[in-house]
Image: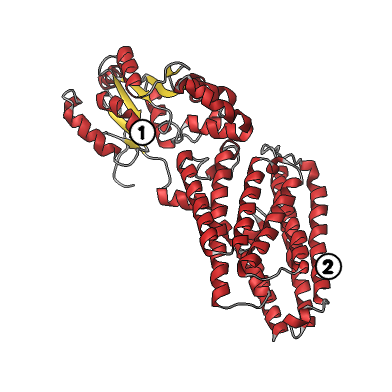
């Protein structure tokens, strides 16, 4: 056919035996846990989990630290254990370790994490012959880990895989150093130190392999900020537009208010993601969030949250009316209280979510110094309460379709679907009734010369809200309905139609 005869390839027995002998002579492979085998720091993750599950224990944390870092890790591991099956493992490194284990090489988990967690990880993966870890008294990191490995395996009797500057002493003395998701500049520093060490094997002065499994820093930052959620803050412009008071100065103030809310929203989203890491890792979609996936460290996230919230407060204090800062502070407190407490309370969570939308409108009005109509406030309360219920309904509907059980601790059950649907649809149509009553209000005539033309909006509103609930009932609503509306073509066309109707009524 192609002129090539395919003959079975035989491998000489002596070649196989030689490979086995080389494998047997290979040094023990020692692997770090934090930042290496797992892309995050177990101690920081446990601290975040404790803050979420039992925040009152924060008062005891300084007492634990007085007994040393190893004791601090032991207390965290005991009070906020991590689910080892859902940790963000370095997939490239895991594949390499499984190959080495299958070939018969001895692999040791050598980590500064607490022994309880380390043994749980070792039992889960099933590729480690031994575990060396912190024991509640000795914090096994840096030179302490180096001495333990040299005492156990000899001065150069081990290869080592690490990720940070803390691992430099061990990497420098290892027979073969390797890196996993190394910090900036670490490979260069390691090459320089290896070059100065006379015992560097065969003159090797650099890591022979780097295991990378992480998004780029810039991409991870953008995902953590949740820029797509900033669309909700466009509500701050609504009072300005409805008051027909658009000019340069008011537009500048509304834009500054928008930026303040964007920074605050991103900062509180980051806090929420840090507290929810453990729950997010067990969710098929939320497990890809940067902190849950290990693409960004929790320490980086905490720093980002402080900078964002500080920047928002500074802009509100220096560039906007004083009353706006009060609304911004209330928004920040409300969102954080939602993350810490109310998100696990049935119905209170959706009431607070809907109130946050209305709060944006009130804050926007304060920024540009206009008065919010009670009709607008009433419409927004019922309208956004319906959309908040859509979000909860959709989550339960997807669980029902997968025949799964709720694990996010929100308190809702799959049996609540029909009741939530009745709450949400009733609230949706109540908002339309309020809008219809608003059209007949005498005040509307001062803003719209032809207010009766606004009646054309009602069928558009009925169609859009009915479509949202219909999609949710079919399991086709997989995201926040407000974000969905800004990416869904029919929704955008409905919004454009309503805008044209408003212009038509104002002519």
**Nearer the observer, 97 or 234:** 234
**Nearer the observer, 99 or 144:** 144
User: x, y (%) of residue 479?
Assistant: 63, 53
Which residue is drawn at the image coordinates 58% and 57% (left, top)? 229
Tell whether 368 sits left or right of 419: left
Classify mark 1: helix, strand or loop. Answer: loop
Classify mark 2: helix, strand or loop. Answer: helix
**Nearer the observer, 220 or 323:** 323
Measured along the vertical axis of the image, is residue 192 above or below residue 253?
above
Question: Mark 2 highlights which residue?
Answer: 433
Q: Which mark is residue 336?
A: none
Considering the image in quadrants, where does the C terminus appear?
bottom right
Tell whether 122 sits left or right of 79: left
User: x, y (%) of residue 131?
Assistant: 43, 18
Who comes first in sequence, dot 2 or dot 1?
1
Question: Mark 1 highlights which residue?
Answer: 163
Which residue is drawn at the image coordinates 53% and 32% (left, top)? 47
Residue 151 seen by the camera: yes
Q: Is the residue marked by circle 1 packed among few (<14), some (14-19), or many (20+) residues within 10 Å?
A: many
Residue 120 seen by the camera: no
Q: Is the residue marked by circle 2 packed among few (<14), some (14-19), or many (20+) residues within 10 Å?
A: few
User: x, y (%) of residue 352?
Assistant: 71, 50
Tell whether 56 sits left or right of 4: right
Mark 2 to mark 1: distance in Å?
61 Å
């Amino acid at each position: 056919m192609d002129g090539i005869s395919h003959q079975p390839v035989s491998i000489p027995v002596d070649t196989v035996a030689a490979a086995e002998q080389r494998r047997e002579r290979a040094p023990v492979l020692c692997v770090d846990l934090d930042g290496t085998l797992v892309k995050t720091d177990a101690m920081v993750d446990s601290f975040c989990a404790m803050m979420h599950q039992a925040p009152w224990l924060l008062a005891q944390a300084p007492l634990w630290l007085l007994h040393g870092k190893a004791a601090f890790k032991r207390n965290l591991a005991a009070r906020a254990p991590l689910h080892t099956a859902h940790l963000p493992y370095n997939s490239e490194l895991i594949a390499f370790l499984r190959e080495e284990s299958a070939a018969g090489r001895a692999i040791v988990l050598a980590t500064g994490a607490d022994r309880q967690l380390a043994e749980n990880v070792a039992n889960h993966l099933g590729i480690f012959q031994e575990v060396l870890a912190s024991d509640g008294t000795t914090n096994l990191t840096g030179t302490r880990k180096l001495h333990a490995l040299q005492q156990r395996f000899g001065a150069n009797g081990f290869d080592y895989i690490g990720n940070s500057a803390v691992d430099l002493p061990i990497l420098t003395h290892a027979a073969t150093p390797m890196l996993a998701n190394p910090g900036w500049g670490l490979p260069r520093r390691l090459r320089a130190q290896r070059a100065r060490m006379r015992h560097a094997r065969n003159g090797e002065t650099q890591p022979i392999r780097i295991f990378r499994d992480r998004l780029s820093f810039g991409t991870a930052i953008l995902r953590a900020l949740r820029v797509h959620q900033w669309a909700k803050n466009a509500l701050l412009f609504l009072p300005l537009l409805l008051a027909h008071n658009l000019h340069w100065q008011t537009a500048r103030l509304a834009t500054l208010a928008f930026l303040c809310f964007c920074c605050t929203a991103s900062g509180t989203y980051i806090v929420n993601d840090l507290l929810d890491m453990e729950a997010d890792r067990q969710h098929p979609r939320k497990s890809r969030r940067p902190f849950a996936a290990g693409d960004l460290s929790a320490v980086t996230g905490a720093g980002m949250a402080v900078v964002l919230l500080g920047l928002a407060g500074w802009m509100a204090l220096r560039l906007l009316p004083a009353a706006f800062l009060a609304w911004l502070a209330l928004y920040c407190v409300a969102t954080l209280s939602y993350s810490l407490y109310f998100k696990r309370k049935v119905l209170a969570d959706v009431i607070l979510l809907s109130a946050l939308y209305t709060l944006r409108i009130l804050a926007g009005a304060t920024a540009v110094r206009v008065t919010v109509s009670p009709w607008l406030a009433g419409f927004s309360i019922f309208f956004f309460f319906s959309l908040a219920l859509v979000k909860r309904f959709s989550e339960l509907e997807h669980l029902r379709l997968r025949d799964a059980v709720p694990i996010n601790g929100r308190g809702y059950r799959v049996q609540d679907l029909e009741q939530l649907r009745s709450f949400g649809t009733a609230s949706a149509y109540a908002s339309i009734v309020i809008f219809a009553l608003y059209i007949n209000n005498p005040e509307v005539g001062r803003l719209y010369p032809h207010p009766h033309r606004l009646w054309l909006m009602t069928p558009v509103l009925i169609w859009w809200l009915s479509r949202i609930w219909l999609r949710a009932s079919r399991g086709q609503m997989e995201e926040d309905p407000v974000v969905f509306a800004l990416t869904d073509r029919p929704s955008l066309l409905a919004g454009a139609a309503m805008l044209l109707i408003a212009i038509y009524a104002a002519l």
